[in-house]
Image (cartoon, rainbow, N blue to C red):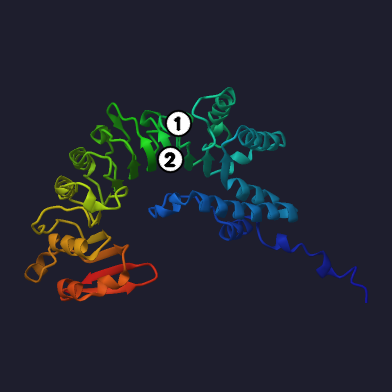
């Protein structure tokens, strides 16, 4: 029996669903990996891994573009939703030429771009003519891609290298890795989230970022943080390795009226015993003036005072970065974990991120000091211990 005239052979199954529904389905299958800011800062640190994931997703989107003509418009949108821009003259030229070719066909796919990674690690310390031309093209980036919300810039890690940022405009989230930057060049009015791991921020005069709500800061040169005004700041995580403690405390006091999360890290020093321990008393005092603070994350190696802390007016979660049992016990003591102060602790949850031998946390000393008052839930895979108070 011939099937040439069989109606089932002529059905366009792709048209049985509306394009908007196909769009939603494919966005779920190939979702953008860099669509919004995440407080899981580890995702930004693994740049190579992140690029590999984006490249893998782009490969699938290109296959969709090639094999299914009916879904090509959606495939183009997915393909341009997130872009990795190689920091070479050829890579930058190729990107802009590709958009120009599409524009000549009647539309600009750059309007679909929401996030972009600009990798400039290959650039030399001395500005060459080709590099100047590249920066001219980068100044056109927001004309070609006017809806970028998130941008990750990876600059050259060379001493005394300044990374121009005046080509960045109108982004909500900015992640920067690299050398010396100048905060005056950042897009102040719209910037909401910033992740900075740079040599210097170049802060020499008062600056205000009215809408910045989240800031991760890791710098190699001491900064005048007190010159920064961040009236909308809700989330702050910074390393004190190269910062002045009192300067940092002043910064927290000035910008802590809406602060809900505060993280204080110690990154560069492995052997804390061989180094003069910083006194973070002034930073904790500043945290006590943040009356909306919910979560405090702090390295247990950073001593506060020898006396237990009184109850904070709003803190309900304490996160300790632990490297050995004695410093964890000292930190817990300072935050009131003693039998006679049990009702004054005030925390609902304590999390210990422990980087030593997991078995050490289950020893007799820890049980005597902790387990009478709190329950330890151990996840051996992640080495994160959630501790909840017994009420």
Q: Separation of disc 1 and disc 2 at Cα?
A: 10 Å
Q: Quadrant of the C terminus?
A: bottom left
Q: Quadrant of the N terminus?
A: bottom right
Q: Are marks 1 and 2 in contact (CB under 8 Å)?
A: yes
Q: Which residue is mark 2?
A: 176
Residue 172 in sight: no
Residue 188 horizontal/vertical position (percent):
37, 33
Closer-to-camera residue (299/146): 299
Q: Which residue is mark 1?
A: 163
Closer-to-camera residue (248/272): 272
Residue 348 in sight: yes
Q: Is residue 390 above or below residue 142?
A: below
Residue 299 horizontal/vertical position (percent):
25, 55
Q: Is residue 45 above or below residue 138?
A: below
Residue projecting furthest to the top: 129
Drawn side of residue 134 relative to residue 265, left or right: right
Residue 297 horizontal/vertical position (percent):
26, 55
Identified at 19% across, 46% down, the residue is 276
Dot 2: element: strand
Q: Earlier in the sequence, mark 1 or mark 2?
A: 1
């Amino acid at each position: 029996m011939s099937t040439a005239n069989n109606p089932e052979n002529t059905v366009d199954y792709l048209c049985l669903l509306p394009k908007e529904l196909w769009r939603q389905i494919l966005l779920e299958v190939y979702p953008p990996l860099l669509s919004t800011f995440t407080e899981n800062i580890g995702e930004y640190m693994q740049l190579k891994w992140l690029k590999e994931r984006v490249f893998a997703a782009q490969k699938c989107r290109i296959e969709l573009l090639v094999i299914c003509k009916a879904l090509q418009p959606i495939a183009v949108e997915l393909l341009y939703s997130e872009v990795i821009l190689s920091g070479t003259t050829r890579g930058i030229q190729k990107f802009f030429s590709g958009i120009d070719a599409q524009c000549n066909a009647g539309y600009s796919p750059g309007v679909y771009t929401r996030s972009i990674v600009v990798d400039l690690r290959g650039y030399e310390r001395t500005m060459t003519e080709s590099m100047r031309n590249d920066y001219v093209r980068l100044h056109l980036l927001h004309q070609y891609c006017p809806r970028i919300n998130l941008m990750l810039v990876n600059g050259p890690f060379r001493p005394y290298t300044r990374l121009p940022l005046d080509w960045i405009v109108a982004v909500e989230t900015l992640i920067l890795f690299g050398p010396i930057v100048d905060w005056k060049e950042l897009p102040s009015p719209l910037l909401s989230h910033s992740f900075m791991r740079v040599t210097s921020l170049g802060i020499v005069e008062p600056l205000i970022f009215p809408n910045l709500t989240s800031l991760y800061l890791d710098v190699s040169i001491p900064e005048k943080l007190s010159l920064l005004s961040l009236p909308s700041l809700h989330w702050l995580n910074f390393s004190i390795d190269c910062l002045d403690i009192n300067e940092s405390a002043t910064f927290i006091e000035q910008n802590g009226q809406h602060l809900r999360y505060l993280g204080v890290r110690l990154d560069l020093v492995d052997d804390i015993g061989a180094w003069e321990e910083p006194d973070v008393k002034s930073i904790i005092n500043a945290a006590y003036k943040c009356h909306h603070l919910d979560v405090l994350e702090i390295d247990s190696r950073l001593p506060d005072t020898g006396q237990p802390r009184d109850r904070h007016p709003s803190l309900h979660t304490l996160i300790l970065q632990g490297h050995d049992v004695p410093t964890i016990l000292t930190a817990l003591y300072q935050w009131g974990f003693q039998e006679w102060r049990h009702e004054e602790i005030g925390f609902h949850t304590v999390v210990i991120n422990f980087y030593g031998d997991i078995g050490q946390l289950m020893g007799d000393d820890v049980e005597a000091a902790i387990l009478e008052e709190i329950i330890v839930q151990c996840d051996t895979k992640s080495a994160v211990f959630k501790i909840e108070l017994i009420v």
